[in-house]
Image (cartoon, grey):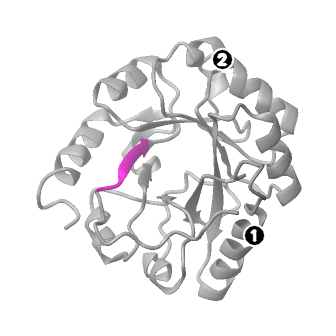
Amino acid sequence: MIERQKPSTENPQPKLKVCGLTQLSQIRELVALKIDFLGFIFYEKSPRYVLNHLGLDEISEINHQGKVGVFVNEDLEKIIEIAEKSDLNFIQLHGDESDDFILELRKKLKSKVGIIKVIRIGNQESEVRRKIEKVFDSAQTDNQQPTTINYLLFDKDSKAFGGTGITFDWNILNEIEIPLPYFLSGGISLENFHQLKTINQQPFALDINSKFEIEPGIKDLEKIKEFINKYKSPKGTT
């Protein structure tokens, strides 16, 4: 069984994930900037669908320990194949994957590969709590089995499955118990990131995407650098 984590009183600064990457030159620069997580979208309907730009072998050759593959209601065997061929470190499930699906995926993935489950947030606190409880219950295992889910990711509820640049009300997170470390996504920008200090249980990582782009899949590296400088400054989120 896994235990619910108590909110940290230390509030260490969250890590940073840049999602929706498609350009090797930009990926290399982000690696040099020591970005913690690199997000690759394997959802064909996304304007940031990585396989329109890079091959699995090219992703595999990227020397980084935080490569995240984003999938939306994808076939299980396809996820396994892509994870192995592109040497992913994390699988992000951004769709409506069932408990049984996640459990089967956990059994077939290499043990070192983490699973991030997205919870899409609307405006109702009770609905969010129900979704969290459902995910938490599905993550329960006996002592002989690995925990199915390693992290949660909170994003705005949208039919577009992410990358919308729309922020949900972060105050909702103060009304619920969050049982696992979590990524925070959805419209994080230079203009609003300072509001993160209002969240009691701080995110494990921030997930930035469309607010730091020139166009879908093409990142604004100067804006990302500005974000890093402001975010990591002593006056950042505190």
As measured in the structure, the alpha-carbon distance from the residue carrying label 2 to the one carrying label 1 is 34 Å
Residue at the left extreme, as displayed: 234
On-image quarter of the C terminus: bottom left
* In the displayed structure image, the side of residue 116 where residue 1 appears, left or right: right
Q: Which mark is residue 56?
A: 2
Residue 157 seen: no
Percent across and percent down for residue 141 are 77, 59
Residue at 25 percent of width and 66 percent of height: 194
Identity, as a three-letter code, of the amino acid under mark 2: Leu
Q: Which mark is residue 90?
A: none
Residue at 73 percent of width and 41 percent of height: 45
Q: Is residue 94 or residue 216 the one in the foreground?
A: 94
Residue at 54 percent of width and 79 percent of height: 177
Residue at 37 percent of width and 75 percent of height: 199
* Residue 24 part of the magenta-drawn span: no
* In the displayed structure image, the side of residue 38 where residue 2 appears, left or right: right
Mark 2 and 1 residues: CB-CB less than 8 Å, in contact? no
Please identify the dominant SS of the magenta region: strand
Residue 167 seen: yes
In the depicted structure, whether residue 111 falls above or below residue 172: above
Name which of mark 2 and mark 1 comes first in the sequence: 2
* In the displayed structure image, the side of residue 84 where residue 30 appears, left or right: left
Q: Is residue 33 or residue 108 the one in the foreground?
A: 108
Q: Can you tell which of label 2 and label 1 is closer to the viewer?
A: 1
Residues in magenta, as a range? 13-17
Identity, as a three-letter code, of the amino acid under mark 1: Asp
On-image quarter of the N terminus: bottom right
Percent across and percent down for residue 158 are 65, 64
Q: Quadrant of residue 138?
A: bottom right
Circle 1 SS class: helix
The residue under label 1 is: 137
